[in-house]
Image (spheres, helix red, strand yellow):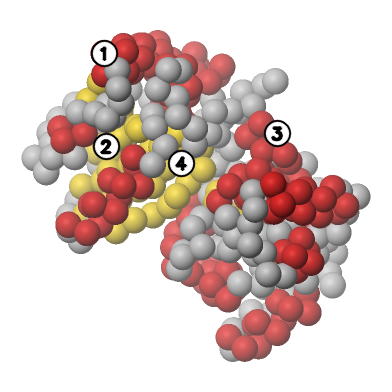
């Protein structure tokens, strides 16, 4: 095996970003790496057993070569025992039906290993989640990625159809009583949208099934006020009824005329964004990109196990883009809420 990535110097700004795929044995991941190699968009690394990955490459008849086109990094370091113990404990505590526990313990430490490479600045971004549970990958990132330990996290999925772009943003934990957490998620989402060269407007959406709508509305107004204090030029509305947020004739005249508009819908309760996404996808010819994990400075993302190789490639194109320098929409006041916030 070639020189491990962990022994290399941090990247210079003029170099290609270094992108790690945690599930290096997955055929879709290897297809995505082949596309990245062909397009020369990044330096790719696959975490996993070299022998297994080489077998998958041969079966898929891919033309990529280890060392010349990409590198394989086997997850062996001083934290190996802790990773294995954490995998065993989590599987037992959550009562997962794991048919092959030794194989689960062996394969499911890849995310933790990749996160440590990101944390030590030996790589620029990572993608995980092609297999396994979302919660398990998130737990490993929380244990090993410093930026996620210090941030309220959420997910962002971008949908586009006939020139309209909508981002569905969801908290990973219900935060209907925490306006600061909602504001942090909204700011993080706006940074991602700006990195796509789009002009965001933010709607803090009301959950009509919440028992105390008046209290929820006050929370959303407080969150909107916090967002405005941090980013005065960012259009933010709250509270917004869901029916108004997704109606087809929605006017975006308040957004920048020089860039395409993007509606950022923030849902402060878990599960709402997923339900809205499924509804939209069933009603029109929407295309979806994501999910992107908020709160990691765009350095780590957890995809769905149903992800395709083409979607992995699109997520890889965005992963690692510096968010703080992507747009001047967010003022310098946002330092205390940014993805790079200090301890």
Q: Is residue 193 above or below residue 204?
A: below
Question: Mark 4 and 3 residues: CB-CB less than 8 Å, in contact?
Answer: no
Residue under label 2? 263
Tell me which numbered mark, 2 or 3, is placed earlier along the sequence.
3
Q: Specify the label residue 146 is tagged with.
A: 3
Residue at the outermost right position: 78
Residue 340 occupies which quadrant of the picture? top right
Residue 91 lies left or right of residue 194; in this view the side is right
- Residue 72: x %, y % from top left: 75, 68
Using the numbered discs, state the Cα–Cα distance from disc 3 to disc 1 in whole angstroms.
36 Å
In this view, the residue in front, 316 or 156, is 156
Q: Mark 2 vs mark 4: which is more N-terminal?
A: 4
Label 3 Cα neighbours within 10 Å, binned few <14 / some 14-19 / many ≥20? some
Give the alpha-carbon distance from disc 4 to disc 3, as whole Å. Answer: 18 Å
Q: Are marks 2 and 1 in contact (CB under 8 Å)?
A: no
Say which element carries label 3. Answer: helix
Q: Mark 4 sits on what residue? A: 155
Position of 59 relative to 64 (above/below)? below
User: Which quadrant holds residue 1?
Assistant: bottom right
CA gap, disc 2 and disc 4: 15 Å
The residue that disc 1 covers is 214
Mark 2 or mark 1, earlier in chain: 1
């Amino acid at each position: 095996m070639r020189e491990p990535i962990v022994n290399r110097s941090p990247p210079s700004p003029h170099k290609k970003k270094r992108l790690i795929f945690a599930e290096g044995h997955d055929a879709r991941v290897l297809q995505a790496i082949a596309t990245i190699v062909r397009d020369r968009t990044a330096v790719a690394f696959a975490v996993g057993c070299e022998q297994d990955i080489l077998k998958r490459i041969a079966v898929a008849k891919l033309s990529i070569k280890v060392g010349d086109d990409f590198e394989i990094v086997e997850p062996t370091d001083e934290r190996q025992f802790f990773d294995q113990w954490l995998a065993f404990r989590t599987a037992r505590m959550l009562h997962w039906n794991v048919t092959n526990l030794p194989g689960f313990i062996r394969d499911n430490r890849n995310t933790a290993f990749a996160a440590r490479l990101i944390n030590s600045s030996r790589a620029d971004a990572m993608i995980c989640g092609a297999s396994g549970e979302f919660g398990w990958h998130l737990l490993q990132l929380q244990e090993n990625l410093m930026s996620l330990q210090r941030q309220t996290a959420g997910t962002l999925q971008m949908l586009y159809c006939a020139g309209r772009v909508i981002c569905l943003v969801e908290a990973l934990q219900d935060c209907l009583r925490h306006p600061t957490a909602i504001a942090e998620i909204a700011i993080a989402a706006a940074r991602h949208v700006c990195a796509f060269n789009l002009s965001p407007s933010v709607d803090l959406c009301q959950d009509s099934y919440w028992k105390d709508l008046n209290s929820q509305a006050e929370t959303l107004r407080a969150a909107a006020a916090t967002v405005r204090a941090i980013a005065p030029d960012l259009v933010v509305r709250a509270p917004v009824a869901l029916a108004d947020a997704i109606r087809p004739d929605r006017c975006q005249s308040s957004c920048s005329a020089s860039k395409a508009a993007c509606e950022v819908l923030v849902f402060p309760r878990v599960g709402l964004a997923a339900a809205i996404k499924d509804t939209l996808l069933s009603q029109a010819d929407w295309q979806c990109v994501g999910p992107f994990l908020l709160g990691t400075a765009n350095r780590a993302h957890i995809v769905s196990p149903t992800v395709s190789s083409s979607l992995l490639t699109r997520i890889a194109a965005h992963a690692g883009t510096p968010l703080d320098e992507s747009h001047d929409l967010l003022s310098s006041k946002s330092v205390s809420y940014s993805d790079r916030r200090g301890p």
